[in-house]
Structures are given as structure tokens and as C-alpha cells.
Amino acid sequence: MECTLVKKIYREAESFSKKEVKISGWVRTIRASNAFGFIEINDGSFFKNVQIVFEKELENFKEISKITISSSLTVEGEVVLTPDAKQPFEIHAKKIIVEGNSDSDYPLQKKRHSFEYLRTIAHLRPRSNTFSAVFRVRSLAAFAIHKFFQEKNFVYTHTPIITGSDCEGAGEMFKLTTMDLNNIPKDENGDIDYKKDFFGKESNLTVSGQLSAETFALAFRSVYTFGPTFRAEDSNTARHAAEFWMIEPEIAFADLEDDMELAEEMVKYVINYVMENAPEEMAFFNSFVDKTLFDRLKNVVSSDFGKITYTEAVDLLLKSGEKFEYPVEWGIDLQTEHERYLTEKIFKKPLFVTDYPKDIKAFYMRINDDGKTVAAADLLVPGVGEIIGGSQREERLSVLEARMEELGLNKEDYWWYLELRKYGETKHAGFGLGFERIIMYITGMANIRDVIPFPRTTGSAEF
Amino acid sequence: MECTLVKKIYREAESFSKKEVKISGWVRTIRASNAFGFIEINDGSFFKNVQIVFEKELENFKEISKITISSSLTVEGEVVLTPDAKQPFEIHAKKIIVEGNSDSDYPLQKKRHSFEYLRTIAHLRPRSNTFSAVFRVRSLAAFAIHKFFQEKNFVYTHTPIITGSDCEGAGEMFKLTTMDLNNIPKDENGDIDYKKDFFGKESNLTVSGQLSAETFALAFRSVYTFGPTFRAEDSNTARHAAEFWMIEPEIAFADLEDDMELAEEMVKYVINYVMENAPEEMAFFNSFVDKTLFDRLKNVVSSDFGKITYTEAVDLLLKSGEKFEYPVEWGIDLQTEHERYLTEKIFKKPLFVTDYPKDIKAFYMRINDDGKTVAAADLLVPGVGEIIGGSQREERLSVLEARMEELGLNKEDYWWYLELRKYGETKHAGFGLGFERIIMYITGMANIRDVIPFPRTTGSAEF
């Protein structure tokens, strides 16, 4: 007999009534008397367990009665609908085969464990309810993002992970080498001889695929990246990881308005997709992780996102009378406390803040006519603060070059980026979405370490 | 007026007849007389160009007549069907706006360029026909892979890029550090003090996500990875890159037969998806890159893949009478010449070779009852050789430990991997597909550098 996925039986329970099925999975709970017993099995295909009823007529009744949590079983039996029970059906076992026993020191017994403890057993935690839900949602959200952009004819672009140039500030980058660190080759001046390194020059791990993505946007019109990015920042917070995944769409013949429209549509699409395709997981998060979750997400998908300029935002914060830890004045980088006040207290919905002072934003953002702000837009959401940072890109070669000079950037390092402005430039824009940030937002999980299978943070690269 | 994508007009040309449209794109060719002219524009949404007809009644006729290749334009005009022409329609311009001029030294003029030359302008090459087709196919194939696995309820798993342990041989791995290479911290014994490094220990870039994926397969039953992997191998060939993307499905309650079935289904699915969704690009490859392409791919999707054991394969090669550069005997690792002979000359279709000698395969592969071979399966395809390597994994703790000891592997480094065998182990299997390899196979492109947006190879990390 072929194995049936538990998900399929749940989704089509009626049609399985009184049918024989075969399922395989892991024991989550077991209760047994001398005459019969109940086993809850999770087969990995679905958030919920299936209840197996077994009786002493089973040939290996004794063995099964003593089976340990997390042992793997194959069960053949009949599906019996149970309209009055919590579960819509159970399986009455005719045969149970033990695939693999689990040692009695299995660390994930039924009692509740702290998330901190579960991080120390990251190889087992996806077997718990919470992490089963988190990582299934992560998978669905990733697919939703691909689906969204592919349906819009965007070209998925794998921008390089290894970069040979240090385009965004070396302090935060991981260096990459194949040199013998005990015996680093030196040139005649006593400097490190990078010519002897793998790529013949210094190399680092990428912090953003944007500049590369722009080259593709100016060929394919609409592209997106979805890949890992890295920060060697020594910041041990619940929101920062050294390795995380980022989505960076880039659109040609488009301005900041188009960019914000795309971001809003994407966020709503991903939330809707996950709500539709993981209703059990989402109900679990709403009950056990964050009771405001559904209200918050429903508010997001049904709102028209707000829009104000940075200058207006600063005015609103100053007028609010609120005492902030970081004092507000025009020119400061907004802190999470400011962002959350704006989106939670004033607007009560997602909010784009646009046109930031150029001095707190990156060199490639398009300078506005006022000469002091840039066409940037950050998306702030209730409960989190910023989840998206975007901008229209500076397409005017002379303006861009002047800006780079002002910031002391070496034009030779960016020759190909600057050439885009020589050969058929057009207005274009893009944004970056931290994938883990949106997973935290969708699940209510508060620590980035708990939405990454094997997180890498300052001082920690276990597993 | 809203912009319309050229792809949409091509796909629904009839319904656009005599309608006004607005399009934006880049000039590919221009011919003009004193009275009228033709511009071919590519808008990035579609492989084919659209022909714009413009006449001297245009306000800026003179400027447009002299427009340079790769300049970006916005055109408003009427769609006129041209049933007798090569293109199904053209657009009669009423208004043409120059978005951005292109300098006359634009390096991608109409004449043909070598792929080698185009690599030196990787920021512009997606504007050429060949690379426009390559990278659109790459995007579609990536999506096809996600779609295939998601439809089968597989969980997409982001396994870590940074690894804190050296599980597969340090020689081929990139080292990662934030230490000052001019002043590497040393401990009291004069050894490098990795406690002072970012993660508090040595760290490397991943060569495979498989071991991590196994942990998730034993929770979710069926999972897949799709992410970048790295080799610091000093091999300057047309088939090797230092950075490439890999797909690694892992399935629980499954053996080698299930694994091969999955691989065959996936390969056929991806080819079919690309053929259906990129017919223009594929026709281009079949005409200009590899005239045997369609025959080859049709053979793949319509064949039942062959299956022989390694031992049978060696017998067939020995009996063939063929003179190989590398002599054949039982125990050798099959070379590309052997693989191609088997799949091209003998079987004339894709072929799984199974049950390789354990000494030439990895420690985690399941030992067969004969004690000298392992339950491995490589997929060989005509024209390329191996594109997939898979195996059933050794689930028996004692056998796995004995094998690791034999190979001198340190069990402490693999404590979590070994624990999977203690807590409800089951038979499971998986395979790895090099994404670039299948893109080369589908497009006929012969060099891996030409299917990666910005390739990283020995001595080269440009852009």
C-alpha cells in the first residue's frame, strides 16, 4: 500500500471514511491500558497530529504500548470519522511497524520548553508545535514571494554572494580568504599580498544585492533577488542576525510612488497567502504566541497604507508631547520608538515615511529638488517598526558622481554601476525586505533566532 | 496612460489591434530616412523586440532619427497588426519621449560579440539576445523548482551558509573572518585565537546543506534547500564555479528508489515548465546555441530514465572495446568520458547509475548488504554526464559510527547529526542538483560563466 499524507486525510476526511490507509510518522504522545491505547502521530506533512487507536489484538501490542516519544512508526488501518471529537477522524490500526525507536532521553518530551532551551537543540526543535509552525510558514512565505513576482513577470536574479569590492563599508563585512592565516603571504612592502588569495584580491560576503540587481533591472525592467546577505555587526539583539535572507526588487521606468505601490501589494499578498495556506499554524500563533496577531494582520491587508514625509513625521512627533528616549529633531535617524509611535499611536496602520534627509541615507538614493532630502521610503508597521527600506535611485550621472565625491567614494570601484547611467538610463526604484523580519511579523515570534533554522549571530554558529 | 508590457501585447495581439498603448524600453536597432523610420525596442518584459514606426510629423522627429542604440524611450502609439510580416504587429508612434540617451561608445552594438568579451561587460550583457534568454530561463527554472516541491508539500528550508564546523574537508572551503589579517590575535601557545573571531571559532562557507536538511526532513518528512554553495577549488574549467546554487531535497520514509523517482519527476517538470513558459527563448537556443537541443530535451521528458548498477556499468564499459583516456576498472570513480559513453552511446537517454563502491562515496551513504557498495544513485544525461548525485542515508547509528571511525571523522563534530539516529530514525534519502548544471543543460550554453549573472571563479570576482 502507498503511504498517504496526513494533510491529505485532514483536507479530504469525508472521502477517506472507512478506507484503509497507510501512514508513517513520529510519536508525539501515547497512552495505553492493558486492552487498548492511543497514539498521536505527526507525519511532518501537516501541523496537526493524527490519533491512532490500537487494541490488544495487534500482534506487537506490548511493544507498541511501551513505544517512546519520537519513535517512528508506520501504521496501516481504517479511517473512522469522529464528528463529536476535537479531531475530525482517527485511524483504527490493523498493523503497526516500528521504523525506529527513540532513546528515552529524548529531550523534547511533552512538557513546555523555553525558546532559549530549544535553540540548543535546533536539530530537534522543528519537531515541536511552535517550530513546526514557524518553519512551515517560512517556507510558504518564501514561495508566496516568488509567486507574487513571477506572476508579475519579474526576473529572479541571483546576485553574487561573494563580492570583490567593498561597496558598502568594510566594518560590517565578513572577509573571505583561502590564505593560510598562520602564514599570510606578504608583498615586497610587507603588505598582505592579496594577489595570492583565491580571487586575486580582497573579497567579502555581500551585504546587499541591490547594485547588481540594478544592472539587471535596466535589461529586464523588473527583477528581484531573494538570497542570503550578511552583516558582521557586533549587535546582540533580538532583531539582528549575521546571516539573513533578503528580497530586493528593482523596477525600471518607475518612481518612488510605483515602488511603494509594489511594496504594499507584496506585503498584503504574502500575508494573504500564508493565512490561506497555513490556517492551522496561524491559529496556533494567534492563540499561543501573540493574541493580537489576527487583528494586526487583518488590519494590514485591509488598510490603505499611510504616507507622510519625514519632515511631517518629525513635526508630528514633536507636537505629540510624548517623551522619547532619543530626542526628536529634523535630521535624526528615526529610532524604533519613533517609528512605532507613528504607526501604532498616530496612524494605527502601516505607514510609509518618505523623503528622508540625504545625510542619513545611502549615496545611490535620488536627490529631491530641495537638495537636502532624497526620494526614499521606509515602510513602518505596528508592532515592529521598519520592515522595508526603499528608494528611487539616482539616475543622473553628474548628480550621482557629485554625491559619491562628497562621500569620499572611489568612482573606479563603481565603474560598472556608473556606466548604467551612460547607456540608456531611466528612472528606476527598488526596496529591500528583510525576510526574517516579515516572518517575525507574520508569526508574532519575537526573536530572529526563532525564525531561522540554524541562526548565526555574534559569537554563535552552532550546528 | 499606463504602460503596457510588450509581452502582454505579443500574447494578446488581436485584442490590442488599433488600440492606443504606451510602452517604455531600450533601443535595439534604428533605421531612419528623411520621412520616416523604424525602431526596434526591447522593454525587458519579453525576449522579442517590438517595431516602432515613426514619421516626420513627430514633433521631435530629428532627435528620434538620430537616437543611439540602448537609449531608453517611452512611446505612445497605435498597435497595427502585420499578419504578413515576421512580427505579428507594430506600433505607429504618436509621441516618443527620450528617457535617457546612450553614449555612442555603447559596447553592445549590433554586431556579434564573443561570450568571452561579453563576460567583461557582465553589467550590460543581459541586454543581448543570448543573455536575455539565459537569465529569463534561469529565473523560470528556479521558480519551476519551487513550484514542483511546493505542490508536493515539501518545506523549503534555508540551511546555513556560514558553518561553524568543517564537515566536508577544509581544503575546499572558504574561510570567513572578521579578524585583522595584519594583526591576527594569538593565544598563549602562539596559535590563532579564534575565540576573538566573530563567531568565537573557525567558520567557513557551506559546501552543502544536506546534513542540516536531514534534521528538517526528520521533522517535516519532505524538505528541500535551494541556496548558494561554495567551493574553493582551484579548477579553472567550463563546468566549475566557486559560487553556485544547489537544490537538495531530502525525504523521510523513503529509500533510493523513491529518491530516483523524485529526481526523474523533477527534471522532467523543470524542462516542461521552461519549454512552456519560454518558447521564444528556447527556440532561440535551438537555432543559435545548440541545434540538437529540442531533440535532446524531448528525449529526456519522454523517456523512462534507465537504471544500472555501477558494477554493471563497469562491465558494459569494459566490454565496449572503446579506448578511454582513463582506463576502466571496478573501484574507479567514473569520469565524464565514461558517463557520457554510457548515457549517449549505450542507453541514448538519461541514466541512473546506482550502488557505487563505498570507498569513492561520502560517509553518510547507506552501506549495502554486500558491505562494499553504498545505496547511491547518480543521474547521467546525454551531452553533459552527471547532473544529480543522490543516496539513501545511513540511518543505522552503529554502522554510521563505524564508518566515521574508519574515515577518521571526529564524532563530536557531528553530535547533532548522530542524534538524529537516536530519536526516531527512519530510512531517508536525498539528492543534490547543481542549478547551473541544469541551466546549461536546458539552454545548451557550454560555460558555467555564461549562466551566472556575475560568476565567481578562480582568480575572478569582478563586478
Image (cartoon, coloured by chain):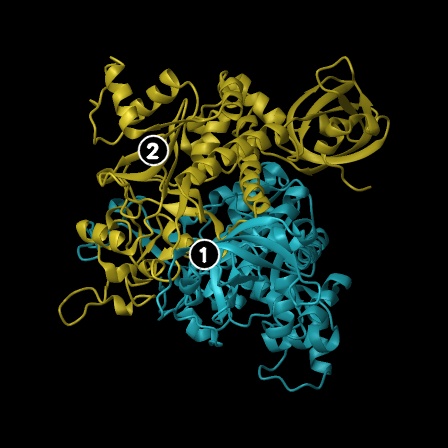
Chain colours: A yellow, B cyan
Label 1: chain? B
Per the rendering, the mark at residue B73 is 1
Q: Which residue is mark 2?
A: A354
Q: Secondary structure at mark 2?
A: strand
Between B19 and A321, the residue placed more toward the observer is: B19
Between B81 and A417, the residue placed more toward the observer is: B81
Horizontal side of residue B461 vs A372, given as left or right: right
The amino acid type found where label 1 is placed reads Leu
Horizontal side of residue A372 vs A452, given as left or right: left
Residue lying at the far left of the rendered structure? A189
The answer, for residue A33, to whether it is visible in the render is yes
- Which quadrant of the structure image shows residue B293? bottom right
Front tag of 2 and 1? 1
Q: Quadrant of the C terminus of chain B?
A: bottom left
Per the rendering, the mark at residue B364 is none
- Which quadrant of the structure image shows residue B333? bottom right
Q: Is residue B253 above or below residue B40?
A: above
Residue lying at the far right of the rendered structure? A18
The structure residue drawn at horizontal position 47% and vertical position 58%, both measured from the top left corner, is B58
Label 2: chain? A
Q: Position of residue A105 (x, y in %)?
A: 54, 30
**Number of residues whose C-alpha sits closer than 10 Å to that of mark 1, classed few (under 14), some (14–19) or many (20 or more):** many
Q: Is residue A160 above or below residue B113?
A: above
Horizontal side of residue A257 vs A232, given as left or right: right
- Measured in 3D between alpha carbons, the distance from the residue under mark 2 to the one under mark 1, in whole angstroms, is 28 Å
**Number of residues whose C-alpha sits closer than 10 Å to that of mark 2, classed few (under 14), some (14–19) or many (20 or more):** many
Q: Position of residue A463 (x, y in %)?
A: 44, 43
The amino acid type found where label 2 is placed reads Thr
The answer, for residue A97, to whether it is visible in the render is no
Q: Secondary structure at mark 1?
A: strand
The structure residue drawn at horizontal position 38% and vertical position 22%, both measured from the top left corner, is A343
